[in-house]
Amino acid sequence: MPEARELREPDRKELATGPAYRFGLDRRSWIATVGAGALISASGKIARSAQEADSDEPGIPPSTRLHLGESGSITVLTGKVEFGQGSRTEIRQAAAEELKVAPEAVRVWMSDSAVTPDDGSTAGSRTTPSTVPVVRRTCAAVREMLIQTASDRWGVSRAALQVRNGLVSHESRTMGYGDLARSRLLTATTDEGIPRRAPLTPTGDWTVLGRPLQRAGAREIVTGDHAFASDLTRPGMLHGAVLRAPAYGASLESVDLTVAGEHGARAIRDGDFVGCVARSSHAARLAVAAVARTARWQRASHPPSDAIADYLRGRAITDGQGRRGPRLSESGDVDGALERGRSVRVESYWIPFVQHAPLEPRSALAEWQGRLLTVWTGTQVPSRVHGELRESFGLSAAQVRVIVPDTGGGFGGKHTGEVAAEAARLAKAAGKPVSLRWTRAEEFMWAYFRPAAAFECRAALEGGNISVWDFTAYNPGTAAIASPYDIPNVRTRYFPCESPLREGSYRGIGATGNNFAREVFMDELAQAAGADPLDFRLSHLSDKRMRDVVGAAAWAFGWNSAGPLGPNRGSGIACGREKGSCIAICAQVRVEDGTVEVERLVSAFECGKILNPLNLRAQVDGAIIQGLGPALMEEVRFENGRLLTGSFSSYPVPRFRDVPPMETILLDRPDLAPAGGGETPIIAVAPALANAVADATGRRVRSLPLRRSKLSEG
Amino acid sequence: MATIRFEVNGQQCQAESETDRPLLDVLREDLGLTGTKYGCGEGQCRACTVLVEGQSRPSCVTPVIAVEGKRITTIEGLAPTGGLSRVQRAFVDADAAQCGYCTPGMILEATALLARNLEPSREQIIEAMNPHLCRCCGYGNILAAVERAASAGEGENA
């Protein structure tokens, strides 16, 4: 089986994140927030935050992972962010499990560059496999310290003690984390004291992890109390708006800024950047519109979206190295096998650009205090935004603070810091804090896109099995490019391409396109072999986890037992693996007058041991429903540099009515480490539907979305 | 600029504003009621939904002059006693929020629906909720929340 390890990369489109810039939050501010207590780092460093601490003391140690308040409060610190995927709840569960406290007793402080440790980007489904274990290890160590401290104080053997509900007790004596925080052991600044390799609670003994836990902070959400970045205010704050080019590639020739004054606004120009600030966002927008009417632009040629597959293939980057260069993986003798193959099948596929369209557009609130810049913004990569601000304004790491409130959706679309830099630029010129929220039109046109991509697939059959597989991908990213199937001769080629639009990450990113092309091609090969698509896949799959999800979905769907579906109906199957998890989806569709109606979706998903079945189901179903968009309706279209799909009315996304009857099976594997579950389910949606449509109509559609025009083309 | 008077969450308010300014902006920026969200500015996502005289309206395309003298309810006004309304409670219990940005609009729409129809069918709920987008695509749990709120309200007035 091809391994192609060098091609496994969760997120090709990501720039390497910068170092963890920090600046000290003075100790007084810290104490004001969490109170006196003990600060504990993942590596066992302990510091004190006492009421009498001098504010001149150095700030919070950068690796602080846990704060135990003398009052008994428990605060976990993480650089991860929450934007709906459930990281806050999951980290709370992880800490509660190991500390043996109720989840409600744990507060999770997320992503403030002055306070929280750098946990990298919140992307690539990494919170579960990377951050949860770190939190568990620290909390398990602290739990063991509590037991050790009680054992020492009371002269009782450790074996006689255990922690329940946050307390260790013996006869009539009890000791809790607040007592531990006040104990001498924890107020010394020392490396000692934290037991190394404290035992993690075994899966079978879990009482918090592995069980459903509702979303943290739900009450603030349903009352409207939760403040997203765009909801925050500061004294004297102004609202901003930014002038945008009318077309991609256009550059500003001239503009009259004075007209902004007619709306009580002030305009600011810095090179091509033009923005307005005013006391209301309405006035700022009107001012920008007035300025826009005076602007003259130098236009540049820009290709149409219609020809995107040819455009990309013609602009493949064939030299270069690393992330920007091509990749090649080969096992066996591909050219020889293609030459020997009696019937070599060749097909091409393509996918368009799509937009994340998170419901909360990019927004930021920026405030300067002298040369110190604080920005509140919704981003999945706070360290990158920190770096962008530092570079934009020539600031040192200690002069920039980035705070990320829980954010209104990301889906891989909020990795960059343009709105933070724009708000900061406006605030600097205005001399006042500025709140900037992108409009939906800006979000559609100027946020980055999931890359468009083209694929060329060649394969030959021998005795009903695939003897050779030659897969070339132009531009999707490399995630899940390696085939999970057992094939003796395999070549996988990847070419990044010059792109007419700004590209970036997305839910599952490259795995969406790579798995679409692979799984549709598998269906075509099954057809050529005269085999059932399920049997054909299973006969090429030795990966036990993949076989399990495929088997579970097919069984629940009744793949083998279903009778004829009748006219215009068809069923399809697709599967895939990525980021340590496996998905299989069976779909039934009805196609009439070129319209695809999804009648049924049965899915099986496995991501190791399940940490929170309630949240996992929401993530899996959400990914599958979101995946209906690029499969059936979403396509970014543009012409002469103008975006033709710049609104929800021209770029439809799935709504309540689009949700089909669904059945989702979550396979729990207590013997496997937990992997993230928010992304991979999306990668099987489009190919399962494309295969079902082919079954229903006898016509093969080799691009997305599965639009009316393609279905009636024949 | 004009002085426009209306009632918000039981309080008399007045806005000194351009008459064509969106109600959404007046609520958020002048009155500090930021529970009402901007999502699209064209009435296509309904994150900005408020109740005007009990009817759901997209505040992003409602000029403030259109609500002069009218009674408005925002998400902040649903549970004035500091508790939760039964729709809010149902959204918590059904774990119906992922990122939560669409949630206030969804709750207000469901509140308006249950005020005019005590026992909506699933189809009637979908009909009422369909204009609202949830980009996390948590539609299943949201429908479950509305159904839960409907059954919790059986035999009482909304």
Image (tube, coloured by chain):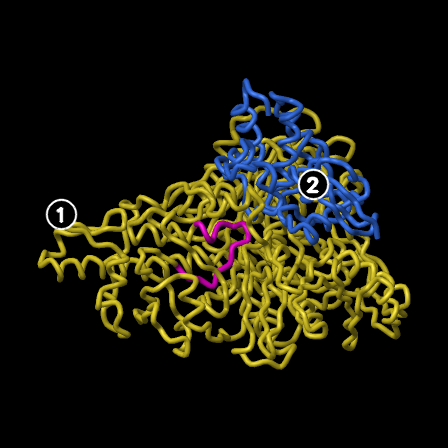
Chain colours: A yellow, B blue
The amino acid sitting under disc 2 is Gln
- Whether residue A340 is visible to the viewer of this picture, yes or no, is no
Rendered image: mark on residue A172:
1
CA distance for labels 2 and 1: 58 Å
The amino acid sitting under disc 1 is Ser
State the residue position of label 2. Answer: B12
Front-most of A540 and A171? A171
Quadrant of the rendering where the C terminus of chain B is positioned = top right
Residue A377 appears at what percent x and percent y? Answer: 60, 62
Q: Is residue B95 left or right of residue A51?
A: right
Residue A351 appears at what percent x and percent y? Answer: 70, 53
- Whether residue A635 is visible to the viewer of this picture, yes or no, is yes
Above or below, B30 against A386 in this view is above
Q: Report helix, strand or loop for mark 1.
A: loop
Q: Residue B118 occupies which quadrant of the picture?
A: top right
Identified at 61% across, 45% down, the residue is A525
Identified at 37% across, 44% down, the residue is A210
Q: Is residue B87 magenta?
A: no
Residues rendered magenta in the picture: A76-89
Q: Is residue A86 magenta?
A: yes
Residue A325 appears at what percent x and percent y? Answer: 62, 72
Q: Residue A315 occupies which quadrant of the picture?
A: bottom right
Q: Chain of mark 1?
A: A
